[in-house]
Image: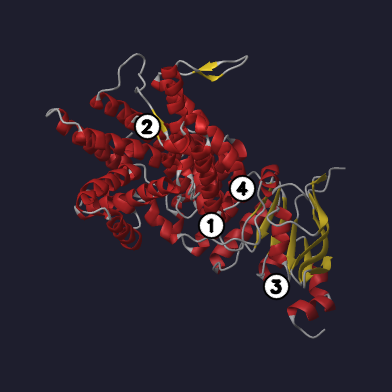
């Protein structure tokens, strides 16, 4: 347990800051900070999902918007049918809509798993730049499908007339909905920390570090990567579902490659393969969008500068900077060297072609 | 009669115009050390890669205790007990020494689809791993991150990882490369002990070690087996002297 705290002080810090930010306004009765915080929480969940594939698994998916968007459609469509009183599926097995958030989240998660199974089976046969391109291609295919499929609004998207309820609890209050998203975020953080620290996580890390070694001790890379890819996609899909209810709108643009880019930016800004990374990353992205966006429409220019700075001078992202700050302040175990720093000293050589699966 | 642990026949592999391994047939019997020597570029490492399944042969067959494993993927061969070390240390650099061995223990004797319980504090994996580290003399360094290990220690760790797979046949690709005399002596002693338990295919440049350990020696030149014989016969063979030891016959 002590180890857990040592490793995750940043996670606790990030969660406390986020809650504090939202609460700071709750007293005054405003809702702007709360909605910002909710957005951060949701994007952080998506980033935590992506981080499992990209950070821990070394699978640079440029198509996670597909899962984010599909999760959104799954949840949105459920509420849409519930509102209309129509069925999602007719015939011998009729599936009606549902105004229950849990149903929407489960539907989103299952959709994410299924889509990742399909996409992963094809794309995980490749690696490196080809993997990036294939995941992008799948996501764009789904994006154009969503745009041209009229039942759920096509290009115009699908407005939702009511937010889902949670076991009868009305979620239309901003603070209530933030609390729900926050709890899902906490769950995602814990799951991510557990999974990456587990036996499975050790295999995933080994595959990222040295695939040949792992093959030589009896691991089939494909099985573990596919599993990680599916878990990653499911988390991102759940975030997509929460996002749709925040906006009250299912937008196909959530599936576009811009969104995939945002998610990668969140992971890299925050710190690759760090549990709290995506929370910091999402907060930084939203903060820049909000603050700089007030001054100029071209705020992404400055986002680009910050990204450059991070990639060139602070590879560990914001989490890495916090580590260094803690170390400089002499906070001992808090300044623990992150994995990503140790990674510099890696020594990998691949003899010949590697046979897989 | 029990099956011969490892029989390879007619194994051939070309890289472009280069025949790296050319119609190689040899076997490893139970409790013997079969050494392979040959000049640089003779195809020794390619041969190990072919046998362990990392590369696919153009022709030929590999049989493990009578079972044809020519088309078996590398991870499955490793799980059967056909295990190897690498010429250039090939380890998980961001993990500790003991964790590298624990991964092999996990692969051999545990399930890897466990998502909740922490890996690093898994007692069962750790104890078995420490046992294997003790065999290679690396137990005191168990907590050190691999990136911080010396070259010699990495060679020892390679061996410990292979041992943790409970091998029935070991393929050792220059286990003594770059080791000082003291470390070499330690590895020679370990290999002599291991010979009592299993068959070993030993690729090694250290001739003292080879002639001290080997029951049989195959000489590989330009990817082909020149001869397979006892150390004494190989030492006397004029063809070997000419091709490899570089002396006039």
Instruction: Say which of marks 2 and 1 sits in front.
Output: 2
Q: Identify residue for label 4.
A: A217
Label of residue A249 in the image:
2
The image position of residue B110, as x and y in percent, is 58, 35
Counting from the top left corner in percent of width and height, residue A117 is at 58, 37
The span from disc 2 to disc 1 (Cα, nearest Å) is 34 Å
Alpha carbons under labels 1 and 4: distance apart? 27 Å
Rounded to the nearest angstrom, the CA distance separating label 4 from label 3 is 26 Å
- Residue at 60 percent of width and 59 percent of height: B187
Q: Position of residue B115 (x, y in %)?
A: 49, 33
| Nearer-the-camera pick, B61 or A187 | A187
Q: Residues within 10 Å of mark 3 (few under 14, many from 20)?
A: few
Mark 4 Cα shell of 10 Å, populated few (<14), some (14-19), many (≥20): many
The image quadrant of residue A305 is bottom left
Comparing B8 with A91, the one in front is A91
Q: Nearer the N terminus, badge 1 or badge 4? A: 1
Q: Please, which chain is the residue tagged with disc 4 on?
A: A
Task: Look at mark 3 in the image and give the residue it sits on.
Answer: B41
Chain ID for label 1? Answer: A
Callouts 2 and 1 close, C-beta under 8 Å? no
Callout count: 4
Q: Is residue A79 left or right of residue B197?
A: left
């Amino acid at each position: 347990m002590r180890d857990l705290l040592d490793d995750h002080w940043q996670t606790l810090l990030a969660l406390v800051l986020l809650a504090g930010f939202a609460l700071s306004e709750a007293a005054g009765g405003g809702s702007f900070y709360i909605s910002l915080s909710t957005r951060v929480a949701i994007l952080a969940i998506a980033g935590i999902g992506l981080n499992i594939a990209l950070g821990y698994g070394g699978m640079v998916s440029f198509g996670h918007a597909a899962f984010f968007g599909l999760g959104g459609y799954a949840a949105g469509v459920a509420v849409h049918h519930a509102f209309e009183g129509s069925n999602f599926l007719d015939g011998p097995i009729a599936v009606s809509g549902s105004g229950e958030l849990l149903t929407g989240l489960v539907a989103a998660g299952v959709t994410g798993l299924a889509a990742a199974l399909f996409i992963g089976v094809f794309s995980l046969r490749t690696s490196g730049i080809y993997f990036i391109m294939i995941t992008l291609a799948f996501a764009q295919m789904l994006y154009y499908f969503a745009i041209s499929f009229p039942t759920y609004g096509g290009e115009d998207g699908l407005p939702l007339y009511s937010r889902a309820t949670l076991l009868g609890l009305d979620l239309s209050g901003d603070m209530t909905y933030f609390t729900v998203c926050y709890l899902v975020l906490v769950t995602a953080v814990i799951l991510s920390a557990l999974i990456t620290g587990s036996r499975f996580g050790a295999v995933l890390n080994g595959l990222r570090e040295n695939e040949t070694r792992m093959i030589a001790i009896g691991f089939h890379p494909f099985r573990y990567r596919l599993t990680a890819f599916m878990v990653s996609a499911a988390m991102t899909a759940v975030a997509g579902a929460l996002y749709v209810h925040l906006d009250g709108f299912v937008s196909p643009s959530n599936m576009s490659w811009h969104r995939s880019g945002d998610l990668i930016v969140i992971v890299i800004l925050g710190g690759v393969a760090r549990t709290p990374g995506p929370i910091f990353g999402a907060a930084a992205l939203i903060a820049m969008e909000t603050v700089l966006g007030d001054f100029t429409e071209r705020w992404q220019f400055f986002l680009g500068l910050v990204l450059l700075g991070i990639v060139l001078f602070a590879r560990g992202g914001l989490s890495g900077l916090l580590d260094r700050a803690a170390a400089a302040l002499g906070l001992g175990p808090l300044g623990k060297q992150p994995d990503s720093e140790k990674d510099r000293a890696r020594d990998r050589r691949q003899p010949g072609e590697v046979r897989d699966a | 009669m029990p099956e011969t642990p490892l029989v390879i026949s007619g194994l051939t592999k070309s890289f472009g115009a280069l025949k790296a391994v050319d119609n190689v047939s040899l076997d490893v019997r139970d409790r013997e050390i079969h050494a392979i020597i040959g000049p640089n570029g003779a195809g020794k490492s390619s041969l190990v890669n072919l046998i362990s399944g990392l590369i696919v042969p153009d022709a030929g067959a590999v049989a493990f205790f009578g079972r044809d494993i020519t088309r078996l993927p590398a991870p499955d061969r490793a799980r059967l007990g056909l295990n190897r070390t690498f010429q250039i240390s090939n380890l998980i650099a961001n993990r500790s020494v003991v964790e590298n061995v624990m991964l092999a223990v996990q692969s051999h004797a545990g399930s890897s689809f466990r998502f909740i319980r922490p890996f690093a504090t898994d007692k069962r994996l750790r104890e078995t791993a420490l046992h294997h580290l003790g065999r290679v003399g690396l137990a005191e360094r168990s907590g050190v991150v691999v990136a911080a290990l010396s070259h010699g220690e990495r060679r020892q760790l390679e061996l410990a990882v292979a041992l943790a797979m409970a091998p029935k046949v070991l393929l050792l690709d220059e286990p003594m490369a770059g080791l000082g005399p003291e470390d070499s002596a330690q590895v020679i002693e370990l290999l002599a002990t291991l010979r009592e338990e299993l068959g070993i295919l030993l690729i090694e440049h250290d001739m003292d070690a080879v002639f001290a350990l080997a029951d049989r020696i195959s000489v590989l030149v330009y990817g082909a087996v020149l001869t397979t014989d006892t150390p004494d016969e190989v030492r006397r063979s004029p063809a070997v002297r000419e091709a490899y030891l570089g002396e006039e016959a």
